[in-house]
Image: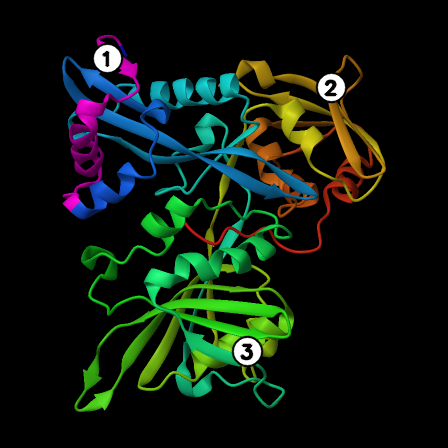
Amino acid sequence: MAGFEIRPARTEEYDAYWRARAAAEGFEPSADGIAHWRHLLDLDRTLCALDGAAIVGTAADVPFRLTIPGGEIAAAGVTLVGVLPTHRRRGILRELMRRQLRDAHERGDPVAILYASEALIYPRFGYGVASFDGWAAIERDRAVFRDPSEPVGQTRLVPLGDAANVLPPIYDRVRAVTTGMLSRTPAWWVHHRLRDLPHDRQGGGPKFCAVWESDGEAAYALYRVHDKWDEFIPANPLEVIEVIATSPLAQREIWRFVFGIDLIRTINAGFLALDHPLTLLLAEPRRLRFTVNDGLWLRLVDIAAALSARRYAADAAIVFEVVDTFCDWDAGRWQLESQASRGQATRTTRQSDLRLTSERLASAYLGGISFARLARAGWVEEVTPGAVARADMMFRIDHAPWCAEVF
């Protein structure tokens, strides 16, 4: 990669940074969109690759707290990655990723996370898919619960201008107990989750917010309607942007509200948990077309810190032999011991029980992909008989990891 400088973007380069980022994916950034990101980006956590004075590659990360089994850890949320089409295949992306992970390691971030525009891009840098997202669609007239019951609680529409004060307590209750969910700052709520710029709507109507409450339980739905009529018959698609609920009852009642919105033909919802209860609640589950995509990708930046931070379902010990050619500080043998559900990972010279790449260990880290599943794919070598089952016993969680939004 001779001739290219990599460094954080400077204040006076902010607009040029965004133009390069947009050109890498073939779109023109809106002035409003650029302005919103000013509230979310710390320039010290951006990177640009320069060919002379021209920015030809970009990357950035946003500081999050990631919920893991039994707690939460700092996570570098990788975003805004791109290389101009004129400069591809020159090693620029590799060097951006190498510098970004080195910076994260020096800051003390145990993991980095991202959503991938293409799944082929990031495994070479040690990222493994750690969760899956469900995308659901159902005809409104088929969106009927199996067990009829009377509505409970009250649902109200909340203006988006007020939602930043109403929704965070609901979200934070769920995030605290849901592996894979991310912290949201006040700025993130205003300038990302609740943002409703014209280009965000993609032909749809304004973003609406509905809040359900009853006896201390709560839920909310963010949604928009896309206007469509078929020979004077309403055929509007309803886009469900986000649904968060603090209990099974709250989940049921907020979906009851969604299913009851008038003038709708189809209901489309994205970023659902892989084990979402809708398939059990509906009278005709087969009417729900449920598509699975890769969701959150995770990179172990500091294996010892990451493994030591989470809780484990069983007290046991296991030695991982980790192959990592991109972040060599993570390569080698690591002994993980769990006592009273707390883990401690340290370097060891003991014989390994499992041999795998850092990418595969990252996939198993949140508990959503079992070591047995990885082994069936040929991605884990079981050196000690029974080690796969032992690792699964330790890493098991009760629900699928879930990240509610792309970033």
Q: Is residue 23 magenta?
A: yes
Marks 1 and 3 sit apart, C-alpha to C-alpha, by: 55 Å
Marks 2 and 3 sit apart, C-alpha to C-alpha, by: 47 Å
Q: Are marks 1 and 3 in contact (CB under 8 Å)?
A: no
Marks 2 and 1 sit apart, C-alpha to C-alpha, by: 38 Å
Q: Is residue 213 magenta?
A: no
First in residue order: circle 2 vs circle 3: 3
Q: Is residue 62 visible?
A: yes
First in residue order: circle 2 vs circle 1: 1
What's the amino acid at mark 1?
A: Phe
Q: Which residue has dot 1 on it?
A: 4
Residue pictured at 20% horizontal, 29% vertical: 14
Q: Which residue has dot 3 on it?
A: 253
Q: Position of residue 29 (x, y in %)?
A: 17, 43
Q: Nearer the viewer, residue 235 or 85?
A: 235
Count of numbered badges drawn on the protein: 3
What's the amino acid at mark 2?
A: Thr
Question: Which quadrant: the N terminus?
Answer: top left
Q: Under tag 3, what secondary structure?
A: helix
Using the image, determine if residue 325 lies above or below residue 21. above
Q: Position of residue 269 (x, y in %)?
A: 42, 67
What's the amino acid at mark 3?
A: Glu
Q: Is residue 340 left or right of residue 86?
A: right
Magenta range: 2-31
